[in-house]
Each structure stands twice: as C-alpha cells, then as structure tokens.
Amino acid sequence: MTEIAHNLAQIHQKIATASARCGRTPEDVILLAVSKTKPVQAISEAIAAGQRLFGENYVQEGVNKIHHFAELGITGLEWHFIGPLQSNKSRLVAENFDWCHTVESLRIATRLNTQRPPHLPPLNVLIQINISDEQSKSGISLEQLDTLATEVALLPGLKLRGLMAIPAPEPDYDSQLAVCRKMAAAYEKLKHRYSTVDTLSLGMSDDMDAAIAAGSTMVRIGTAIFGARDYSAR
Ligand SMILES: *Cc1c(COP(=O)(O)O)cnc(C)c1O
C-alpha cells in the first residue's frame, strides 16, 4: 500500500468515526482530496486507491492536471475549483472544472454562466460564505445570501448545489462547532428553498469532526492525504 493509499484509508476511518459519533452515516460525508501544488503522480496514487474527487486552488495548475488525466483516458474523475477566483480566470474554470466552490458575486456567477460550454452539463456551484466575518477573507455575509442565491439559481449554465466556508481557526471544538452550526443552519434553509441544493462544503483537517457533527456533507482534506505542500516549486 502506498503512503497516499494509507492516508486515504485513515481519513475514511476518521470520517466514519466522526459520523458515527453524531449518528450520521459515513456515506453522507464526501471526501474531497485537495491536490493543489501536488504532482500528477500523487493524484494517480490517490486514484489507484479509489479517490475520484479532487480540489484545486490555482486555475492553470488545475487545468493542466485535468488535461493530463483526460489525455490518459481516465474518466469518472470530478474536479472542484476551491481557490479564490479572479474574473480573468473564470473562463478556464467554466470550460474545465465540474464544480466551483468559491462563487461570491453575481458578476463572477454571470461570467461562469456565460462561459460554460453548452455541450457540458451545468457547472455545479457553491456560494462561499465568510462565516467568521474576516476582513481579509473571501465570501459573502449570510445577510447577502438570499439575494445572491436567487440570482444564481436563475442562471441555466450553473447548478446551485449549496454553500462553502473556510472558518477562521478556533481555539477548541465547541467554538468550531458553534461556527459550523451557523453554516449548517443557513444550508438547511437554502436546501428548503432549492431542490438542487445538497452540498455543504465545510471542514478541513483541523475542524473536520466539528464540521461533520454540524452537518457538513463534503470535507476538504489536503495535507493529511498528500503530505506537506512545497510552495517554492510554484
Ligand atoms: C488547501 C485547502 C484545503 C486543504 O487544506 P489542508 O490543510 O492541506 O488539509 C481545503 N480547503 C481549501 C479551500 C483549501 O484552500
């Protein structure tokens, strides 16, 4: 077993334990493997171990990887864009990715909608919420959600699937849980309004247990699968 296969098995075990603890089934929590900065070889190892969903933060890097696996004829992979999206890069996301987790304005949603090629299914999108209300962080406030969701839901090139957040680090589990529950409440409301909504992208290595307890349906894990990142190579 490769180290990556071993790590994946360990994460699945952690997801199962966290789910069982709050009476959820592990199948309700999807694992997104965050492969940013990692070479295609590492992704191949994860694929060999059964992983199919990958998250990328940098548009061109992600597109190169998507093309690499497409050229190898490997199908059934799902590529999620999870990084901050500048409008001059939206076309590459619309043309290549399956999901975008970081929609935070009507402007970017409109561009993605227009640029999504008609032969592809609608781009799955999540609206990013700045749940910890950090000045420097991406995402809209919960107060702005209803308006943006209404607008996004009308765009035929996009499919509104739910919400995403990157909560600020919290000192303990209870504080993490409190933040995650705010997200879960907003998600439940949205789900009630739109039948397409089924995804709450919440939880990383440090707050995965709290996110699952609150109701996350997709956790985003990088380092614990692929090891520490080396940004000097970028
Ligand atoms: C990098 C990243 C992750 C994964 O972080 P790790 O600490 O490597 O597990 C998850 N979500 C987003 C949005 C990221 O940018």
Image (cartoon, rainbow, N blue to C red):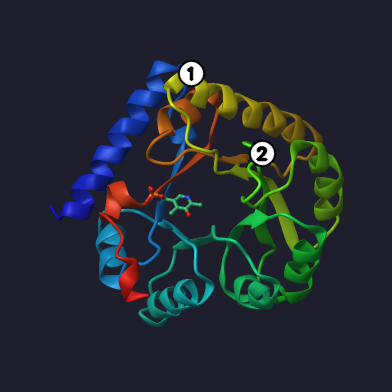
Residue displayed at 49% across by 63% down: 57
- Judge left or right: residue 2 versus residue 9: left
Question: Could you tell me how far apart the alpha carbons at marks 1 and 2 are, in whole angstroms?
Answer: 18 Å
Nearer-the-camera pick, 174 or 78: 174
Q: Residues within 10 Å of mark 2 (few under 14, many from 20)?
A: some
Residue 133 numbered mark, or none: 2
Question: Going by the picture, which residue comes out furthest to the front?
Answer: 135
Relative image position of residue 102 (x, y in whole percent) = 63, 55
Identity of the amino acid at label 1? Asp
Residue at image mark 1: 174
User: Cβ(mark 1) to ligand 1 < 8 Å?
Assistant: no
Relative image position of residue 215 (x, y in whole percent) = 55, 28
- Judge left or right: residue 181 versus residue 44: right
Relative image position of residue 46 (x, y in whole percent) = 29, 58
Q: How crowded is mark 1: few (under 14 residues within 10 Å), some or many (20 or more)?
A: few
Identity of the amino acid at label 2? Asp
Nearer-the-camera pick, 142 or 2: 142
- Judge left or right: residue 184 versus residue 4: right
User: Cβ(mark 2) to ligand 1 < 8 Å?
Assistant: no
Relative image position of residue 79 (x, y in whole percent) = 50, 63
Residue displayed at 39% across by 17% down: 21
Measured along the vertical axis of the image, is residue 11 above or below residue 56?
Answer: above
Measured along the vertical axis of the image, is residue 139 above or below residue 62?
Answer: above
Question: Going by the picture, which residue comes out furthest to the bottom?
Answer: 71
- Judge left or right: residue 202 versus residue 52: right
> Which quadrant of the structure image shows residue 172?
top left
Residue displayed at 45% across by 17% down: 22
Residue displayed at 57% across by 73% down: 96
- Look at the numbered disc 1 and give the secondary structure of its residue: helix
How many numbered markers are drawn?
A: 2
